[in-house]
Image (cartoon, rainbow, N blue to C red):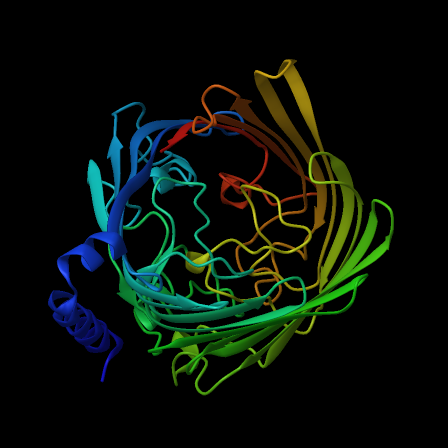
Amino acid sequence: MTLRLLFHYMMGTLMGTLPVLGQESAEKQVSGSFSGEWRTYYMQTVNKGALQDFQALATGGHLAYTLRLGKSWELGAALYKTTDLGLGQWNTPDPQTGKASRYEEGLFNRLEPSADMVLLLGNLYLDYHHKGHAIRLGRMKVNTPLINSQDGRMIPTLVEGLWYAYQFPDRYGWQLGIVNRIAPRSTGDFMGIGESIGAYPAGRDPEGRTSLYPGHTRSDVVVVAHGQVRPMESLQLLAWNYYIENVSNSFYLKSQISLGGPWEVAAEWLHQNRLGEGGNGLDSLRYFDQARADLLGVQLRYGNNKSGASLAYDHILPHGRFLFPREWGREELFSFQKRERSEGSAQNHALVITYRKPLVVKKDEATVQAILSAGRHWKPPVQDPALNKYAFPDYTHLNLDFFLTLQDFPGFRPELLLTFKRAHGDLPDNPNLFFNKADLFHMSLVFNYRF
């Protein structure tokens, strides 16, 4: 029985039991509520020299409804929407490179740039929860290190399938997810697993040719497993495993150790290996085109929930590129910075310093949370596609992120993100190597209101 048929069967069975409840009992146990978010999002990217600049303005958000059926059952649905307000020619290609915007197109349906509006029934699920156990069946958001909503755009990444979680307070917990369809961020529909791999730019294969795996990857299911344990008060271990049928397996392990007071140190390891055909039996159409890959990282943190600083280092070893579908979420690694990622690289080094501090604008009325991150990223040569899938140069990355909180309007949380990236080294005279990648300034101004 497919997940979709099972979902309809469970809903029908549940609905069929409701009439047997007495009227007074049903009134006490059945209740519904609306919630949602309205968001207006402005983006601007200024590229180097005469290369084309971009800007875009979108508005939309999502409206959700939750129906509670007794103490343990719940039905939920959410409709997501984004509308192009027509500011700027964000989908007009740059004359020199032939490429349109990279960031601005993510406010809309990047697979159908001409569409002025996107509507997506992103959530449609049945929940059961009891004594720390929770089961969700249907369409939903999930939050894991490699598959997540990554909702720095208008429409987040969503998945369809079955998800189980158990949490014992402060000690241990685990999760198991079986996913058969994914709606990648900034698209307008759910896709099969293989179909979704390649919905974003595919880069180069190890021989330097354009990757041909989009539309040719064979995979029907992703299985995600997670466990966390705190064997002692000062130590926590977290493990995630991502099994992509016929493509790859990715195992991620993170340990966090408290050093006393505000100090904490953490380490991470990501190991990947190919499964089956790596996506396709033909080398030229294969997504996971290597035997394995490994990433190692360490992070030192100081501070509390409100303010603090961290120093992080990640290294992708030279024997394989870190490959995971970027359509499915941002990579929550120690060296991650908004508006870029490390996926597609091997022999990659990244050093990132982050500092966060609340700034009181008006006592007890307004606070600005400021986050500064500065990163230096060393890449393999752009001429080496076996180590550098997207031909990305060495670069320095600066982010300054501001979040405003108003005491009288708790649902209103504007954000201003300022990004600067500068390329390093002697690059060939080819603007494709830095256009929309480095040597740019980017701004995102977002007005969020949750209700």
In x, y percent, where is residue 250? 56, 74
* Residue 428 sits above or below residue 209 on the image: above
Residue 108 visible to the viewer: no
* Residue 282 sits above or below residue 430 on the image: below
Frontmost residue, 340 versus 386: 340
Frontmost residue, 26 versus 106: 26
Horizontally, residue 131 falls left or right of residue 190, namely: right
Horizontally, residue 244 falls left or right of residue 40, namely: right
In x, y percent, where is residue 271? 64, 74
In x, y percent, where is residue 447? 41, 26
Q: Quadrant of the N terminus?
A: bottom left
In x, y percent, where is residue 397? 66, 38
Answer with the quarter of the image where residue 354 lies.
top right
Answer with the quarter of the image where residue 75 lies.
bottom left
* Residue 193 sits above or below residue 124 on the image: below
Q: Quadrant of the C terminus?
A: top left
Frontmost residue, 128 versus 6: 128
